[in-house]
Image (tube, rainbow, N blue to C red):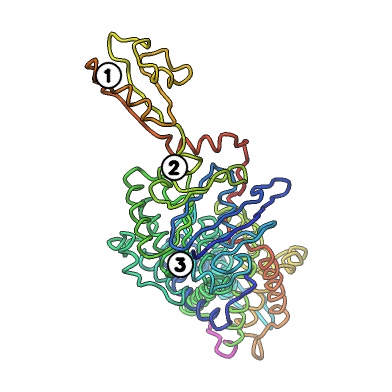
């Protein structure tokens, strides 16, 4: 498969502090790749090296067939960058910002069409600095798309959004896939990665700690399922079938709301349901779930030492 | 961060000319820019010429001129510096801290085009301010518009504006954030205006203050403009020594800017 980004043994040192400690990455054409990690894990440093803003200390980096540290305008015309923090151009309208940036590229997309793509067509004549937070982010995305990039970097695109603005942004990002754009998404929202990404890589303390699809990362698909229910009235633990009692999680046998863990949930659910039906119990709050991506992520990054955020 | 694979020179010029009208439009739409850069020099000329003008005269090379007439080239210097130095430092620092420069850096636009496009705006604004002040001087204070020395005046305005742009980019590179830009530029320029013949004629200043002012480019810009503007000047009115000193300061600024200019926010 066509590889768009290939990184091997990447290291970045700021004085005595090593922010990135030898990582490998591979991003394939057309996928949405999520790069997750807590603040200070080396996420932004890595992205800024891939974007060509920073020079690495060591390692190999190939983005669209070139080394970003040495790439020129022709390479920049093939990428789009949405920065974590950037404000609109002052004293220009949305359409003027777009035309300014369109002029930077050899073969830009049409301005009107690009504004429609991000849902800003109505605001074309508004002053860019008058836009709401969500609209500004849309303008950032529109500016990053105006050059018709093959590869788009989105650095924490929905930080500070309310839930509905986040949903709208997700729809927009999902729409980029239809354009055939490869997306390198940085985020610390697990639901965002789960919703958008084809593949996920987690960085913690300068090292890659897990890679996979949102469904399999960190052995998530093999992890024990959690089964919860409340003991029906007038029953006790001793009344439960042995298979159910054996699955009780440690220290969870005290209250009436029980937590069971099972690698093969049917071996527990079968006897439990048979027992409940035979005695006419409803078990109305029965719940079965896999660990969420967030649970996996928190477990993976739990050993993170208090790393300092590097500018 | 200069890219080793740079754009062809034709692209640099074409994209600088693409950038220029957007920067100019943004400048004209900004109320602070309009007041401090366009209106304030006019206000200063009217105030200084009214307070100290009248029947007073100032000694200049070759004779004397009315004090109100003397203020025209001095305030032109202030106008040029306001457009090419003060306004540039404030707006470029703000753009850097807002991430605007960083975002532009991710596009194929060459660094030189962004820098030159903004400098072109500064030069055009400086030329416009000069023209406005010349007309006011002519209409209100009967100062002549120097046709014979016009080329010298034009060259001085452009050399001055370009040099102060370079100094502006140099100063921007050491200012940490947007809030510091305004006070720092004023702290640098206000004392220099006083000792360089902008607000007070050099002929009435103590010798040592003039000597201090002599070191800095503001004084030489005022002198070069006065030479081109002074009706007693014989010849074409080019103050070559002053122009050379201004250009040397500009070159020094350019060297600092090339080494230190940052596209990424400092966030200090």
- Give the label on residue A190, or none: 2
Q: CA distance from mark 1 to mark 2?
A: 36 Å
Q: Residue at x 66, y 78 (%)?
A: B224
Do we see residue B121 in this rendering? Answer: yes
Q: Residue at x 34, y 26 (%)?
A: A269
Q: Which residue is mark 3?
A: A150
- Nearer to the camera, A173 or A126: A173
Subunit of label 2:
A
- Give the label on residue A26, or none: none
Q: What kind of element bears circle 1?
A: helix
Specify the segment rendered in magenta: B144-150
- 1 vs 3, front mark: 1
Residue A185, given in percent of the width and then of the height, sits at 47, 53
Q: Is residue A16 above or below residue A50?
A: above
Query: In the shown orientation, is residue A221 left or right of residue B94?
Result: left
- 1 vs 2, front mark: 1
Q: Are marks 3 and 2 on the same chain?
A: yes
N-terminal-most mark, 1 or 2 = 2
Residue B105, given in percent of the width and then of the height, sits at 54, 65
CB-based contact (under 8 Å), mark 3 and mark 2? no
- Nearer to the camera, B264 or A9: A9
* Residue B149 lies in quadrant: bottom right
Q: What kind of element bears circle 2?
A: helix
N-terminal-most mark, 1 or 3 = 3
- Nearer to the camera, A66 or B208: A66
- Give the label on residue A276, or none: 1
Query: In the shown orientation, is residue A174 left or right of residue A224?
Result: left
Subunit of label 3:
A
């Amino acid at each position: 498969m066509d590889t768009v980004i290939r990184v091997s043994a990447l290291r970045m040192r700021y004085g005595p502090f090593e922010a990135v400690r030898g990582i490998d990455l591979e991003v394939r054409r057309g996928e949405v790749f999520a790069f997750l990690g807590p603040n200070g894990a080396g996420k932004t440093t890595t992205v800024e090296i891939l974007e060509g803003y920073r020079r690495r200390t060591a390692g190999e980096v190939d983005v669209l067939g070139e080394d970003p540290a040495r790439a020129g305008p022709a390479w920049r015309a093939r990428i789009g960058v949405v920065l974590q923090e950037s404000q609109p151009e002052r004293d220009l309208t949305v359409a003027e910002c777009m035309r300014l940036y369109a002029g930077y590229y050899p073969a830009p997309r049409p301005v009107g069409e690009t504004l429609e793509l991000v849902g800003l067509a109505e605001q074309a004549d508004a002053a860019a600095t008058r836009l709401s937070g969500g609209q500004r982010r849309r303008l950032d995305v529109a500016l990053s798309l105006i050059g018709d990039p093959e590869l788009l970097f989105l650095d924490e695109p929905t930080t500070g959004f309310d839930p509905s603005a986040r949903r709208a942004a997700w729809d927009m990002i999902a729409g980029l896939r239809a354009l055939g754009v490869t997306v390198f998404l940085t985020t610390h929202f697990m639901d965002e990665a789960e919703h958008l990404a084809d593949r996920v890589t987690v960085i913690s303390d300068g090292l890659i700690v897990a890679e996979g699809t949102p469904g399999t990362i960190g052995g998530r698909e093999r992890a024990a399922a959690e089964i919860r229910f409340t003991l029906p009235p007038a029953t006790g633990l001793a009344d439960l079938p042995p298979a159910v009692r054996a699955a009780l999680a440690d220290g969870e046998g005290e209250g009436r709301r029980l937590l069971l863990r099972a690698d093969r949930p049917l071996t527990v659910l079968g006897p439990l349901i048979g027992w409940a039906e035979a005695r006419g119990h409803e078990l109305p709050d029965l719940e079965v779930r896999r660990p969420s991506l967030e649970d996996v992520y928190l477990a993976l990054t739990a050993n993170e030492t208090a790393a300092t955020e590097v500018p | 961060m200069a890219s080793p694979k740079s754009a062809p020179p034709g692209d640099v010029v074409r994209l600088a000319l693409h950038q220029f009208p957007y920067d100019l439009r943004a400048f004209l739409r900004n109320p602070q820019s309009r007041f401090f850069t366009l209106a304030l020099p006019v206000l200063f000329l009217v105030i200084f010429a009214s307070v100290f003008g009248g029947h007073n005269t100032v000694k200049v090379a070759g004779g004397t001129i009315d004090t109100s007439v003397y203020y025209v080239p001095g305030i032109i210097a202030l106008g040029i510096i306001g457009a090419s130095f003060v306004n540039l430092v404030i707006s470029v620092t703000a753009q850097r801290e807002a991430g605007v420069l960083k975002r532009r850096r991710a596009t194929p636009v060459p660094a030189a085009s962004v820098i030159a496009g903004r400098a072109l705006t500064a030069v055009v604004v400086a030329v416009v301010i000069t023209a406005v002040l010349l007309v006011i001087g002519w209409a209100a204070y009967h100062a002549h518009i120097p046709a014979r020395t016009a080329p010298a005046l034009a060259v001085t305005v452009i050399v001055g504006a370009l040099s102060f742009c370079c100094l502006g980019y140099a100063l921007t590179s050491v200012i940490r954030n947007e809030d510091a830009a305004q006070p720092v530029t004023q702290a640098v320029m206000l004392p220099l205006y006083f000792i360089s013949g902008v607000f007070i004629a050099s002929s009435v200043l103590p010798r040592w203050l003039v000597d201090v002012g002599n070191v800095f480019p503001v004084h030489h810009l005022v002198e070069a403009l006065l030479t081109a503007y002074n009706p007693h000047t014989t010849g074409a009115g080019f103050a070559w020594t002053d122009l050379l000193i201004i250009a040397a300061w500009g070159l020094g600024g350019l060297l600092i800017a090339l080494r230190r200019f940052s596209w990424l926010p400092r966030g200090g």
